[in-house]
C-alpha cells in the first residue's frame, strides 16, 4: 500500500473523479465482465440526520426534567381499519429482512430482541419461519413481489401485513440472492431448486398499479377478516405521490424507506445511484399525509421511516419531521454482532474487514448472521443476540426521550419541525427547516417567524 | 341466506355484503347469520363482477359462483372446490394452495398467479401472464393464453389446449408447460423439450382431471427451463 504522505511528496495526488475506489471498480469490471453485487446500503455521503440540530429549551421554551418527568414512547399503528392495531411500547421497529439473507438464528434473535423491547419485527422475502413467529410478540408479514413462501396460514398468523412495493436501496429493482445461500431449507421455503440463484421480481405479478393495489388490499383484508393493519412499503423516490396513492388505496400504515436503507444483495450501482435520501423523503411523505388529513390522527395513517437510522438522535429527528415510528435494519444487524471486531481476522481472510463487511450475498459471514452455512450460523447465539438488540433498542429510545424532554415534550412524537434547524443549505431545503441561526428555509418565501 | 335444497345454500351477493359472505365461507361466526356447515354446497348469486369473491377459504367446501367475478376470485384457496359460471377477472385463484377452481368462461390476466397447489381450469381463454410465478399449481386452459405466461414459473404444470402468446416461460425455473397449438415466442431460458413417456402420462392425467380426456397428449409440445440462468454469469448478463 502507498502512504498518502509519501505519494504527496512525490507530487502524486488522487483524482477526485477517478479516486482509488473508482479505479478499483473499473479494474474489477474489466476483469470479470459483470457488475458488482453486494449487500448493505449506500456508502456515499448523503444529506442525513447529522445535518440537523435540535433547539433545546432555554428561556423561550420549557424543558422537562430529565429522568423524572414522563416522556411517552408508545405508538399505535393501524387503527384506521384493523380490528387489532399494533400497540408498540417504543417507536422503533425492526425492518423486514429475509430468512435466506439472514440465518434462522439471526431471525430468531431479531424476534427476541424486539419482543423484549416491546416492538415489532418483520419477515422478509422468503416467508415466515416458526422460530421467528415463536419469538416475535408482534410480527409483520411482508407480502413481496416474489411471493416466496406466501401462504394464507402465515397471513393469518401475522399481526400486520406489509405490502412491499419497493425498497430504499433499490426502488424499482428486484432481488438477486445468489445460489450459495439457497440451502435446502431456504430452497424448500421458496419452492426453488437448492443452490441456484434466486431472482426476485421488481413488481407484483398480479397487479399493475395503484387501482389494483386498492383491490389487492381489499382481498388481503377479506382473507384475514379485517383484523390486521395493512402496511404499504415504498422505496423513497417520489414519496409525495407514492404515499398519497398508498393512502387512497387503503393503507393503514405507510413505510418509506430512504436511500440509505440496506439490502441483502443488489447491484452496487443501484444502491449508490437510485432513490433519494431518507432526510429528503420524510417531509414529502408527511405533506402527503397532511393534505389528506390523516397525519397524526387517532384514526389516521401512520408513517414509518427507515433508511440509515443509527442513534436516538436519528429517531428523534425522524419523529420531529413527522414520522410516527422508525424501522432499523442494518443497525439491528450491527447490534446483533455483525461486523464485530472479534471476527476481524476472518473478515480479512475473505477480503474484507470488521466494519466493512457487506458481501452478504456470499453467505460466508464470519459472525454467522447473514449466512446459511450451518457451521457459521452455529457461532451466533440467538439469546445473546436478542439481548444485545434489546439493549440497543432501549438506548435508542432513551436517547430520543432525552432529546424530547430537552425540547419540552411529554411524548417523543410531540417533537416537531419547529424543534429543528439545519447545518447545511441542502439539509434545510430537504428537511424544510431553517438553516441554523437564520429564518431561511430554502425554497420557502418570506420569514418563517 | 336461502336454502336451494336440503343440501345447497344460496347467498345473494346483491343482498349480503361481500365481507359477510367471505366470513361465512371461511367458517367464521357472523352476528345475525347462521354458520355454514362445511359439507353444505354453497351457491353465490349476483356476483356482478365483484372483487375478492370467495377468498381465503380453508375447508373442503363446494362453492358455485353464478356469474362473472372481478379480481382475485377464490384467492389463496385451500381445499375448497370453486366453480365460476362466468368469466373471471385478474388473478383468479391467485396464490391458491390446494383445492380446485374451475372457470367456465374466460379469465383475465395473471390467472393462477403465484399459486402453490391445487388445480385451476379455465375452459375458455386466459389473458396475459397466466401462471405467472406459479409455485406448484396445475393450470389447464381450454383455449389460448396471452403473452408473458408462466413468467418466472417455479413449479407446477401449465397446459394450454390452444395457442400461447409471446415470451412464454420467460426466466422459467422448474415448472413444465404443455402447449398444443402455436407459441408466438419463447422467453429467456425457455426451450422446447422432448415428450418422454412420463410426460405423456402426466399430461393425460392433467387433461383428464380438467375434463379434456379426449385430447391426444402426443399432439402437445413440452416446454421448460434450459437452466442457463440458474447461476449468475457474465454470459447471461443481458438476461438480467
Image (cartoon, rainbow, N blue to C red):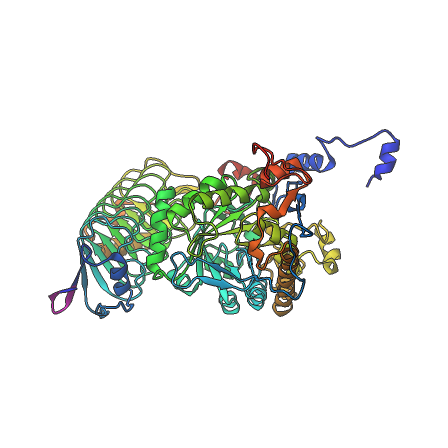
Q: Residue furthest left?
A: B5
Question: How far across and how far down the image is residue A18, in percent?
Answer: 71, 31
Question: Which quarter of the rendering shows the N terminus of chain B?
Answer: bottom left
Residue B89, image x, y percentages: 27, 46
Q: Is residue B155 visible?
A: yes
Asked if the stretch drawn in magenta spans residue A361, the answer is no
Residue B6 on the magenta segment: yes
A37 and A85: which one is in front?
A85
The answer to whether residue A178 is above or below residue A394 is: above
Number of marks? 0
Residue closer to the observer: A189 or A407: A407
Query: Residue drawn 21% across and 47% down?
Result: B87
Q: Position of residue A449 (x, y in %)?
A: 60, 39
> Left or right: A78 with respect to B120?
right
Prevalent SS, magenta region: strand
Q: Quadrant of residue B100?
A: bottom left
Is A137 situated left or right of B224 in this image? right
Quadrant location of residue A229?
bottom left
Provide residue A311's location: percent of width, then percent of height. 65, 54
At a point 19% along the width and 65% down the height, the residue shown is: B41
Front-lying residue, B84 or B211: B84
In the image, which residues are magenta? B3-9
Amino acid at each position: 500500500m502507498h502512504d498518502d504522505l509519501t505519494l504527496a511528496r512525490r507530487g502524486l495526488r488522487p483524482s477526485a473523479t477517478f479516486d482509488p475506489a473508482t479505479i478499483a471498480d473499473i479494474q474489477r469490471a474489466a476483469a470479470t465482465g459483470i457488475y458488482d453485487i453486494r449487500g448493505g446500503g449506500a456508502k456515499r455521503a448523503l444529506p442525513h440526520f447529522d445535518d440537523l440540530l435540535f433547539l433545546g429549551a432555554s428561556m423561550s421554551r420549557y424543558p422537562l426534567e430529565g429522568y423524572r418527568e414522563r416522556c411517552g414512547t408508545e405508538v399505535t399503528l393501524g387503527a384506521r381499519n384493523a380490528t387489532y392495531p399494533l400497540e408498540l411500547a417504543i417507536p422503533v421497529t425492526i425492518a423486514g429482512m429475509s430468512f435466506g439473507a439472514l440465518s434462522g438464528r439471526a431471525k430468531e434473535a431479531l424476534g427476541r430482541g424486539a419482543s423484549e423491547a416491546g416492538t415489532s419485527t418483520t419477515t422478509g422475502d422468503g416467508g415466515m419461519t416458526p422460530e421467528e413467529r415463536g419469538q416475535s410478540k408482534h410480527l409483520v408479514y411482508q407480502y413481496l413481489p416474489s411471493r416466496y413462501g406466501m401462504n394464507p396460514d402465515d397471513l393469518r398468523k401475522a399481526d400486520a401485513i406489509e405490502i412491499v412495493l419497493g425498497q430504499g436501496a433499490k426502488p424499482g429493482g428486484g432481488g438477486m440472492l445468489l445460489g450459495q445461500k439457497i440451502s435446502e431449507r431456504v430452497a424448500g421455503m421458496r419452492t426453488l431448486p437448492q443452490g441456484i440463484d434466486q431472482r426476485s421480481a421488481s413488481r407484483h405479478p398480479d397487479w399493475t398499479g395503484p387501482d389494483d393495489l386498492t383491490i389487492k388490499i381489499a382481498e388481503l383484508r377479506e382473507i384475514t377478516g379485517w383484523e390486521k393493519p395493512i402496511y404499504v412499503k415504498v422505496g423513497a423516490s417520489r414519496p409525495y405521490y407514492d404515499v398519497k396513492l398508498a393512502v387512497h388505496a387503503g393503507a393503514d400504515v405507510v413505510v418509506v424507506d430512504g436511500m440509505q436503507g440496506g439490502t441483502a444483495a443488489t447491484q452496487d450501482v443501484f444502491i449508490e445511484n437510485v432513490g433519494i435520501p431518507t432526510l429528503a423523503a420524510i417531509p414529502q411523505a408527511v405533506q402527503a399525509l397532511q393534505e389528506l388529513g390523516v397525519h397524526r390522527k387517532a384514526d389516521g395513517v401512520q408513517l414509518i421511516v427507515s433508511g440509515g437510522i443509527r442513534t436516538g438522535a436519528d429517531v428523534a429527528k425522524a419523529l420531529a419531521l413527522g414520522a410516527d415510528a422508525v424501522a432499523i435494519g442494518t443497525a439491528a444487524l450491527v447490534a446483533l454482532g455483525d461486523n464485530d471486531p472479534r471476527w476481524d481476522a476472518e473478515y480479512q481472510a475473505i477480503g474484507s474487514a470488521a466494519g466493512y463487511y457487506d458481501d452478504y450475498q456470499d453467505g460466508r459471514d464470519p459472525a454467522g448472521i447473514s449466512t446459511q452455512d450451518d457451521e457459521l450460523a452455529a457461532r451466533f447465539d440467538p439469546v445473546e443476540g436478542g439481548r444485545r438488540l434489546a439493549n440497543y433498542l432501549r438506548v435508542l429510545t432513551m436517547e430520543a426521550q432525552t432529546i424530547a424532554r430537552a425540547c419540552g415534550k411529554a411524548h417523543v412524537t410531540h417533537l416537531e419541525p419547529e424543534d429543528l434547524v439545519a447545518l447545511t443549505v441542502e439539509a434545510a431545503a430537504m428537511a424544510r427547516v431553517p438553516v441554523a441561526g437564520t429564518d431561511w428555509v430554502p425554497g420557502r418565501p418570506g420569514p418563517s417567524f | 341466506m336461502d336454502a336451494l335444497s336440503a343440501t345447497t345454500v344460496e347467498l345473494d351477493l346483491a343482498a349480503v355484503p361481500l365481507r359477510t359472505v367471505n366470513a361465512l365461507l371461511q367458517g367464521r361466526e357472523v352476528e345475525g347469520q347462521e354458520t355454514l356447515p362445511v359439507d353444505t354446497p354453497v351457491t353465490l348469486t349476483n356476483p356482478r363482477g365483484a372483487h375478492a369473491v370467495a377468498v381465503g377459504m380453508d375447508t373442503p367446501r363446494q362453492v358455485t359462483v353464478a356469474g362473472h367475478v372481478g379480481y382475485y376470485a377464490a384467492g389463496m384457496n385451500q381445499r375448497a372446490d370453486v366453480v365460476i359460471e362466468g368469466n373471471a377477472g385478474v388473478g383468479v385463484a391467485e396464490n391458491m394452495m390446494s383445492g380446485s377452481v374451475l372457470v367456465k368462461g374466460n379469465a383475465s390476466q395473471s390467472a393462477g398467479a403465484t399459486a402453490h397447489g391445487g388445480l385451476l381450469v379455465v375452459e375458455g381463454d386466459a389473458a396475459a401472464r397466466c401462471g405467472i410465478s406459479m409455485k406448484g399449481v396445475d393450470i389447464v386452459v381450454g383455449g389460448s393464453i396471452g403473452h408473458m405466461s408462466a413468467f418466472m414459473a417455479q413449479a407446477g404444470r401449465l397446459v394450454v389446449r390452444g395457442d400461447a402468446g409471446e415470451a412464454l416461460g420467460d426466466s422459467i425455473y422448474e415448472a413444465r408447460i404443455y402447449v398444443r397449438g402455436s407459441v408466438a415466442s419463447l422467453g429467456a431460458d425457455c426451450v422446447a423439450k422432448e415428450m418422454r413417456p412420463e410426460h405423456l402420462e402426466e399430461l393425460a392425467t392433467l387433461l383428464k382431471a380438467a375434463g379434456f380426456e379426449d385430447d391426444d397428449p402426443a399432439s402437445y409440445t413440452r416446454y421448460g427451463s434450459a437452466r442457463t440462468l440458474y447461476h449468475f454469469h457474465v454470459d447471461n448478463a443481458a438476461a438480467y
